[in-house]
Structure formats: structure tokens, C-alpha cells
Amino acid sequence: MTLFHHRGKSAIRRLFALHIIASLLASAMVLGVVYIGTMRLLENQTAQAVDAELNGLVRDYIEGGQFALRTDIADRSTSRANADSLYLYATADAHPIAGNLSRWPDVPMDGSWQTIHLMRTDIDKNVLVGLRAITLPGGARLIVGRDLRSQREFRDILKYASWALLASFLVFGSLGGLFVTRSILKRVGEIQQAATETARGDLSRRVPLRGSGDEFDRLAESLNDMLSKNETLVTELQMVTDSLSHDLRTPLARLRNTLETILTRQPDGDTTEAISNALSEADYVHQVFTDLLDIARVDANLAQSQIEPLDLSQIVSDAIELYTPLAEDKEQSLKADITPFIKIEGHKQFLARAVSNLLDNAVKFTPPGGEISISLTPAGNTALLTISDTGPGISADDWPKALQRMGRLERERTSPGAGLGLSLVAKVAALHGTQLVRQETGEGLTITIPFELYSG
Amino acid sequence: MVSCPDTPYISLMRILIIEDDTSTARFLEKGLGEAGHATTWVETGVEGLTHALDGPYDVIILDRMLPELDGISILKTMRSNKVQTPVLLLSALGQTDHRVEGLRAGADDYLTKPFVFSELLARLEAILRRSMPSSSDETTLTVQDLTLDLMARTATRGTRKIDLQPREFQILEYLMRTAGRIVTRTMLLENVWDYHFDPQTNVIDVHISRLRKKIDQPGETPLIQTVRGAGYRMVK
């Protein structure tokens, strides 16, 4: 039987985590590209503006000479409209002539774009500056630059905005994911619960509908359809086996009653014997019929609802105790190694019957002086029930046949019974979600049945 | 009809038979009448329930499959109405899971058709005796010179102490509690082993013969009798 795990691995949770990580990476990439692109664009624009201004000043210098340049720079340095513009006009040996920078910095004189921290004399602050420095015809030096503070501020805002976006994405994405995952898991859980309870025998169980008509409702509806059909089928099967049982047992009862009534009239010896034989035959028909129906009903899971936690050790010990005198009478040694208090979920009567059948077969087929051993031992989260004998055994080829209904083997031809013993054991094992395993041994027959331990 | 006329049965029982199969019902009426009991036979579930709820019956034989109202429903209605009259479910539904279901619904015993009449009678008497309050508080059981001490878990025959295995003690206790009445192999399996199915081989016989060797030794009056075709009986 399937165990129902409420917690544990969840594909939907994993998928959502992956989805959030992927979304975060993609967003971070887009934001990064936007950020770098914007910053580059701004810097290029500044560099170009500085370049244009530098060209204008050089033209002024060439046309108006040293004085014109000096006035020009002084004007521009103090103009409020050019608050971010920086200038330094210096002699060939770097002595400042005009401008709003304190001293000549150590920068290449090739007119390339440089960024550097410099002291602004007009506002008395050390600021980050982007600039171009050149040597004018005649050896004097000229710097035109821009105070990059406002650009940096913009960059910071962009940076914070990006982080905030990613953070809110993570938070809301996770919360949303958690919510969606929870509601999906809840509905999947409802479906699983219904399936588990159905498997345990509650055939009237259905998946609850929300009435929203969404995909889960549609899934639930198809599952409910299936469960209804299943219930109908099982109910029909139950009715068929019930009426079969009734229709065969009632005439058998009448037959038996009639024969019994005749016996009470004290007939002569021959008649008594004939009627006694007829009674035995009627009882035999009844026994075979009961076994066959039991197999059919176990097969159809009709006993599922009677499964409950129980002490398997007790059941096995009781069966051993029941068969020990029989084995002793046949001079067989019956060895038992039963670990006490092994709990499983099972059907008490059918388990007792299965163990009895196994012991019955072992006693039946083991020659006098032979040995039968039975053990029940825990192994991890299972309990292994093993029974072995020193009888003729069943070959690997015959094994599948031995587990079939009415699959009588050569060794059974001469013994009574309809060959239903092992097939009932096989069905009972299947009812408990397990199976019979034939062990390859030198002699005799060794059968192991692993049972899942009851955990809660 | 009754296999052993000398059997000292419990005095007259008033038995309600709820059974739709005429042949089975007549067979029951005849047999139970011959055994000295008073029977009332009704054919339908509804009629049966009315009788079961109101009638002065000692025990009810209830068929499980009935027209209109089935046996399990009658049983459940009776028990929920606090009617505790002992019920023997007599059913053509004899699978292991059916029996478990019937007993869980509140039946005192479950017998499958086809049945042996003596077994039915033995079971009726057993459940009737069980429903009497006196028998449960005893601490010792005595049959002739055989004494079973339920507290000390010892058995003695005359002055001889008998060494019993736990299961042998249980079998003996059951036989002594039902002393004078027939106990079938199935009854022993159900009451001593709690097995509600028939193992293929007659394992019970081996257990009884071992117990008998301990109880009835040469020279002593045999207390455990074999009733041919029916089962065993402890003499009274």
C-alpha cells in the first residue's frame, strides 16, 4: 500500500524556486545593461560637450589671443549657467592663469577624456571631474572639464532603483510563489488524500470540488468519474459474488439439511455410509467454493476496509503454535525464530490464514524426520517472513503455476485440496502490497514475504 | 434430528427465526422444536425487525440476505436501540471478510450456510450462556473431579496436578465452560484461536488428543468425548 507523505519533496516548490531565481537573473541582466548603457551614454555626451567647448576655446585663443581666452574662461567660470563646467588656463610650466580649478593636475596632455578628483576653487570642494587637457599653440595649457557629481547622483539613484526592483521582485515573487505553491499543493493533497482513502477501501470517497471550474476542478471531476465507476464496479462485483454465494450456498444448505434429516431416521449401514460420503462431498464443494470466493474477494480488494495495525509476530506465533503438534506427530522438527512485537497494517484473518496455509503445505509436503523453519525478522523498514521446508520443493518453472488459482502441481496430485493454498497466500500478500519470493535453495522450498513495517 | 438425545441442553429457549428461505426455516423449526425449544418464524426483514425489537426472545437466528431489509441493517438497528438479545447470523455469505463484518455489526456469532444442525444448536446454546451474567465472575471451574483455577492458572484432577501449556489451558477452559454441550472444531478455532476460517487440515483434533492424554489417564472416567460428525463434548 502506498504511504501518504504530507511533507517531503515537492516538484512545484522546486519549480517555483527555479522560476524565481531565473526571473531574478534575467531582471538583474536587463537592469545591468540599462545601467551600463545609460552611464556610458551620459559620459559620452559629457565628453562630446567638453570636446566642443574645448574646440571653441582654442578657436578663441587662435583668433583673439591670450587675453580673449583669459576673459572667456573667467566669464565662463563664474557663470551660474555653467555651474558644472570647470576650466583651467595655465602657463607652459603649469601656473594657473584663469579658471576654477586650484592647480594643474597630473594628466596626459593629448586631449583624451580623463576622470580625476580635483579641488574646485569656486566652491572650495574636492570633486570628481571629467576633463580634457591640451597644450595650446605657444606652449600654454588648457583644461576643460565637467563636475561629475550630478552624474554620480543620477548613477546612484539608478543603482538604488535597480536594487529595490530586484529586492521587491524577490520578496513579492517568493510570497506569490509561496501562496501559489501552497494552494496547488493543497489541492494536489486533496486529490492524493481521496486516492489514498479509496485505496484503503473507502469507495464512496470523492475529491472535493471548488465550483470554480478551473483545471483542478476538471481534474477532480474526471477523477471522481473514475472513482464512481470504480465504486460501481466493485459494488457490482460484491453483488455478483454475494448472490453467487447465496445461490450456491442455499441449495447446498438444503442438500445438507435433507441428508442430515435422512441420517436421523437411522437407515441401514450401507445407506448411512453412502449418505455420510455425500455429506463429505457437499462439504468439500463448499470448502473449495469458499476458498475460490475468498481469493476472488481478496483479489478485488473487498476486504481492504478491514485492514488495521496489528501484531504480525503474534499472528505468526499463534499459527506456529497451532501446527506444532501436527508437525511433531509427523516427526518433523518445527523451528521458529520470531522477533516479537512486529507491527504492520494488515487483515488479521487473512494473514492468519496465509500463515496457516504456508505451514499446512510445509507439514503436508515435508517427509517424516524433515525440518520446517519459520522466521520473522525486521530488515530496515520491512519485516521478512520466511518459511522453509525439506520437502520436494517447487521448481522455478513450476513456481508461477503454483501461485495461480487451481494451479495444482504434480506433488499435489495425490493429496486432498483443490490447490488453492498458495494462490490464496499470493493474493493475501498482494492485499498487503507485497509478494511471495521463492528463494533458490539446494533442497526443499523456501518462501520469503517482505512486509512493510507499520510506522505510525 | 438431534444427534444425541441424551445431551443435557439448556432449558427451553424462545427463538426468533428471521429467514426467507422456506426450506431452511422449516428445517430449523423442526430441529429446534425437537430439541425442546419454542420457535417463531418470520420471512421478511421488516417483520423480523418488529419482532426483534418488541418480542420476548432469548436468541435470534438472523439470515443475512433478506428481502426489503437485510440482516446487518436489522442487527445495527437493534443494537442502536439498545436491544441486546443475542443474535446468531446465519448466512449464505460466508467469506472471511463477511464474517468479520457481521461480528463487527454486533452479531454474537456467525454461522455460514450450509451448516451442520448440531453445530447451530451448540452455537445457540453457547451464545445464550455467554449472555447470562453469572458465568463470568467465576474463579474456578469444576467438572466432576477436574478443577481449573482461573486465577492461579492451574488444573488438577483429583489429587493429580496437570501440567498444561497456555493454549491447552484455554481449550480446557472453553470445554469446561460449555460442559455438557457439543463444541465443534470451528467453534474451538473461533473461540480459542480467534480464527474465522477453516484451516485445511484438521489441526484441532491433534490438540484435543494431546489435551485428552493429560486430562483422561488410564483408569479415570473419560471427560472429553468425541461426538462423531460434530465435534467434542466435555461431560457434565
Image (tube, coloured by chain):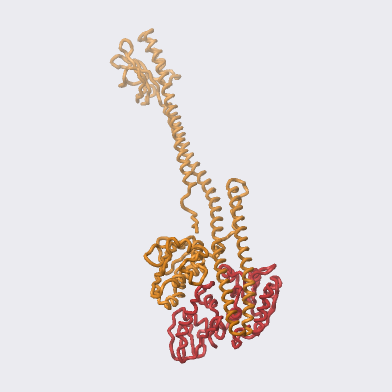
Q: Is residue A142 above or below residue B185?
A: above
Q: Position of residue B132 (x, y in %)?
A: 59, 81
Residue B4 percent across, percent down from the top left? 59, 86
In the rendered picture of this protein, how many numbered marks are placed on residues?
0
Q: At 37% from the left edge and 10% from the top edge, which residue is drawn?
A: A61
* Residue at the limit of the structure toward the left, as seen here: A93
Viewer-nearest residue: B187 or A4: B187
Q: Nearer the viewer, residue A445 or A413?
A: A413
Where residue B147 appears, as percent x and y from the top left, is 49, 87
Residue ID at (44%, 20%)? A80
Task: State whether residue B128 appears in this view.
Answer: no
In-image side of A441 versus B174 (left or right): left
Q: Nearer the viewer, residue A201 or B112?
A: B112
The chain in red: B
- Chain A is shown in which shade? orange
In the depicted structure, whether residue A241 falls above or below residue B195: above
Q: Nearer the viewer, residue A424 or A179?
A: A424
User: Can residue B92 be seen by looking at this rendering?
Assistant: yes
x and y, in percent, of residue A424 in the image: 51, 65
**Residue most toward the front?**
A270
Measuring 40% from the left and 25% from the top, which residue is drawn there? A148
